[in-house]
Amino acid sequence: MEDATAVNRRRDADRGAMRNIQVQLAVALLSSLLSLPAASAFGQAPSNAQIVEDARTDYYNLPQQGLKEFRCDLRVDWGAALDSTKTDAAGREELLAVLRQTHFEAAVGTSGAPRVSLRFEGAAPSDDLAARVHAATAGVQRSLSGALDEFSSLLFGSPLPPDRDYHVAAQGDRLQITFGSDEVRIVETMNKDHAIEEMIVATQHATVTVRPEFKRADKGFLPAVIDSSVEAAGADKMELHVEIAYQNVEGFDLPQTVSVRDQQVAGGARLEFSFSNYQIAR
């Protein structure tokens, strides 16, 4: 018979696997905003199409600015990240001593999803301690990956339809843009200033809702806040709150800090990731 520790570890692994599935689902659906093929379900009047095409130029787009990929280091307050874990004081301090010698590395660009890995700066820990580090960092890394997926889909792509095959309807002082196919249907709400306020991506089995808040910078809208949720059959609802502050790196507006609130990590406490040591590929 399994002891309590083994049962808890297996349960946590099951939860982690389910969360991985949810994150992958969210990424797959959000990426459909960038790569969805033309659908034949909707036609479009030229006047409404022009509104959307005019709006497209209002958004900051890194590839259009000449950036193909960036790599960087990311650091997080591990003390805050571990506040919700059930670890005795001595074990927590031992774990923190190792975690404070780590950082994340990320690669974000036009080819594929963002890639995130954890790096040790000091000597490699023992196998037992390395396993504890992996368990302690897995949820934080998944939340970070989810945040990178969300804002990179906006900075390296466009929140607007990839072609002119869509339908626009007036909703008071806002426009509702509908496009998609039989498998994926996307409904966006855009205000009179051309800022997207909501994106709903629906399939037969899941719905992703994204509510971004944009700030207008010199070269176009930058996503400053992104609230998202994923509802999928057979899984708990997943919610993520992301806030982004920017810095200028070699002429590009890139993240300086990204704050994430995820109910399944650190009890929903705010985790702030600091970005540094950028490497730019043009």
Image (cartoon, rainbow, N blue to C red):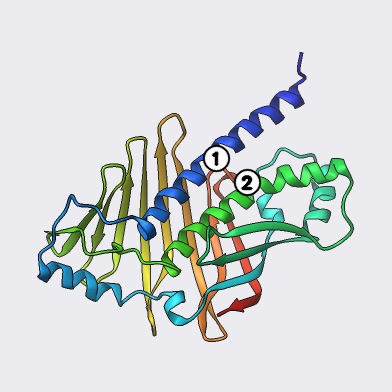
**CB-based contact (under 8 Å), mark 2 and mark 1:** yes
Relative depth, front residue between 164 and 280: 164
* Residue at x 24% of width, y 59% of height: 189
The location of residue 104, given as percent across then percent down, is: 69, 61
Q: Quadrant of the N terminus?
A: top right
* Residue at x 59% of width, y 72% of height: 70
Residue 32 visible, this angle: yes
Residue that numbered label 1 is attached to: 19
- Is label 1 in a helix, a strand or a loop? helix
Amino acid at dot 1: Arg
CA–CA distance in space, label 2 to label 1: 9 Å
The location of residue 83, given as percent across then percent down, is: 67, 47
Give the number of the disc on residue 139.
2
Mark 2 residue crowding within 10 angstroms, few (<14) / some (14–19) / many (20+) = many
Q: Quadrant of the C terminus?
A: bottom right
Whether 19 is drawn above or below 161: the answer is: above
